[in-house]
Amino acid sequence: MTTFTPHRSAIRRPTSRRSVAAVPVVAASVLALLLGPAAPGTAADRVGVAAPGDRTVVGDGHVDLGPRFDRGRWAVEIRDDTADPATWRAPDDVVLQVGDAARITVPDDRAFAFLGEPGARVWLLPQVQREGVLWPGWNSQDPEVAATVDREVTWQLTGVRGPGDFVLFLNGSFGTPTVLFDGRKPLPQETGIELNSHVHGNWAFTRPGTYLLDVRMTAEDKDGTHYEDSSTLRFSVGPQDPRRAFAPPPSAGPADGSAALLRWGAGGALAVVAAVVTPLVRRRLRDRSRRQEGTRT
């Protein structure tokens, strides 16, 4: 298990809540044993597009979340740089695997108390690339996006489902963390992605299992046209089979079906009781009425 040790090198802090600057990829490490960053892909690279339903698990190497124009339609997708050529994929077709190689322990540093108690285990996808660990970032470098959007893209976290907590943060000046998203706080939360920029941060998960992060990206062009799309990121954390994360979430899976079955069963039982009791009640009322008529006669 790796001990979480914040590196004391500088990284530029976002200038505002809605503006996260293009942080240099050679920025500070947040783990003591991280390797230097590999050069990410650029907008000029040849990039493919995966067919819908072409599912894949990515557990190592570089990926980015970002918007692109798909035949004129604004879409939030994942650029998979582990493929050759780099490939844009629908988030529903991708599981981002956070294996035990990403497990660290929370340092005894009050600045990182948002990760948990000192010594607690956390699974962390780091801001700077580490061998054998997934390196996810986000970008606004799609050529058509860069040529169309005015100023920046707004990125929102709108929902978090999982067995533990999720936090996304940057390692700022002198190692001081800046939290961008915290799934324990009211949603939605938002940050900005400056146009034609590429950023990396630290993605932290406190327990193993499947996490579903609902995200939305919006922007406007120079004419005021609004663009918006929502999607769900799927993370498999810990030693489970990562393909389990492709299964529908409990709120839309067997649990709902079971609840519906229970509701049907309860309703069916009431219907059966009503079908049996109602004729009996009617018969007794009819007999009572006949007796009363006989008494009056």
Image: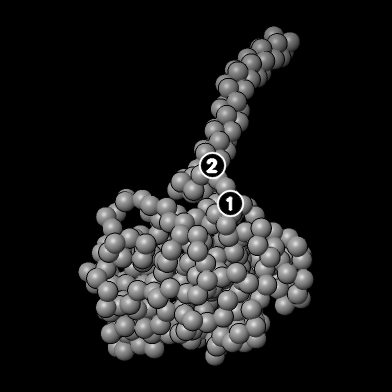
Per the rendering, the mark at residue 238 is 1
Callout 2: SS: helix
Compare residues 148 and 82 and report the one nearer the observer: 82
Q: Amino acid at mark 2?
A: Asp
Residue 60, relative to residue 13: is it above or below?
above
**Image x and y of residue 31, in percent:** 61, 71
Q: Amino acid at mark 1?
A: Gly
Residue 180 in sight in this render? no
Residue 33 in sight in this render? yes
Callout 1: SS: loop
Which residue: 55% across, 45% down? 240
Residue 133 in the figure: left or right of residue 148: right
Other-residue count near label 2 (Cα within 10 Å), few / some / many at <14 / 14–19 / ≥20: few
Q: Which label's residue is closer to the chain start, 2 or 1?
A: 1
**Image x and y of residue 78, in percent:** 38, 65
Q: Which of the image's four quarters has the N terminus?
A: bottom right
Query: What is the quadrant of residue 173 in the picture?
Result: bottom right
Residue 158, relative to residue 10: is it above or below?
above
Which residue: 61% across, 28% down? 270
**Image x and y of residue 5, in percent:** 68, 72
